[in-house]
Amino acid sequence: MANEAVLVGRKNHPQMFTCADGTGIEKGTIVKLTDPRTVAASSADGDICAGIAAEEKIANDGRTEIPVFVDGRFRVTTVASPAAIAAGHKIKLGGANLVDAADVTTAADFAEHMGRSLETVGATTQETIEFDLMVA
């Protein structure tokens, strides 16, 4: 899988979330939250992050749950965004398994926050950074 999140350190054990039996989710996939307490692979800017898949879920394997990290330290890939990401800045999902600088203009934007960057990334640059996942 491209751009998988790589665990660097964790605080707590993964939490179980519901997923569709027909869904395949690779370990390290940033997953979005849907209702009720269900996850799927991230796909777009603005998805609400549920966390990062702690193990692989094979499509049609009969399982309807997957463990998801809701906190911890990970390496992730950024979007080549027009905005820079500063160390300590809030980040959000920026696309399929990508992160971007978080918007902070409306109350709805705060639901998109998934953690804070531990590194600086220049504008229009795509690179791998370390970040603290904080969705719990």
Image (tube, grey):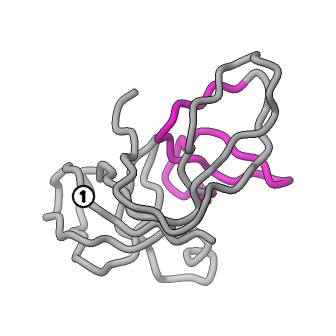
The N terminus lies in quadrant:
top left
Q: Is residue 39 magenta?
A: yes
Q: Is residue 25 left or right of residue 17?
A: left
| Image height of 69 relative to 30, above or below | below
Q: Which quarter of the rendered picture does the C terminus lie within?
A: bottom right
Name the residue carrying label 1. Answer: 129
* Secondary structure beneath label 1: strand
Instruction: Work out which residue is located at the far top of the displayed protein and give it.
Output: 60
Could you tell me the amino acid type at mark 1? Answer: Ile
Classify residue 103 by image quadrant: bottom left
Q: Residue at x 37, y 57 (%)?
A: 74
**As displayed, is residue 30 above or below residue 112?**
above
Q: Is residue 38 left or right of residue 9?
A: right
Residue range (magenta): 23-50
* Closer to the camera in the image, 29 or 6: 6
Of 75 and 99, nearer the camera is 75
**Spot occupied by residue 90 in the image (x, y as percentages of width and height):** 39, 76
Q: Residue at 50% across / 67% down in the picture?
A: 114
Which is more toward the observer, 53 or 111? Answer: 53
Magenta-colored stretch includes residue 37: yes
Q: Position of residue 5 (x, y in %)?
A: 39, 46
> How many residues crowd mark 1 within 10 Å: few (<14), some (14–19), many (20+)?
some
User: Which residue: 15% across, 53% down?
Assistant: 125
Does residue 129 lie above or below 41 as drawn? below
User: Seen in the image, is 116 located left or right of residue 104?
Assistant: left
- Across and down, in percent, residue 76 comes to 33, 51
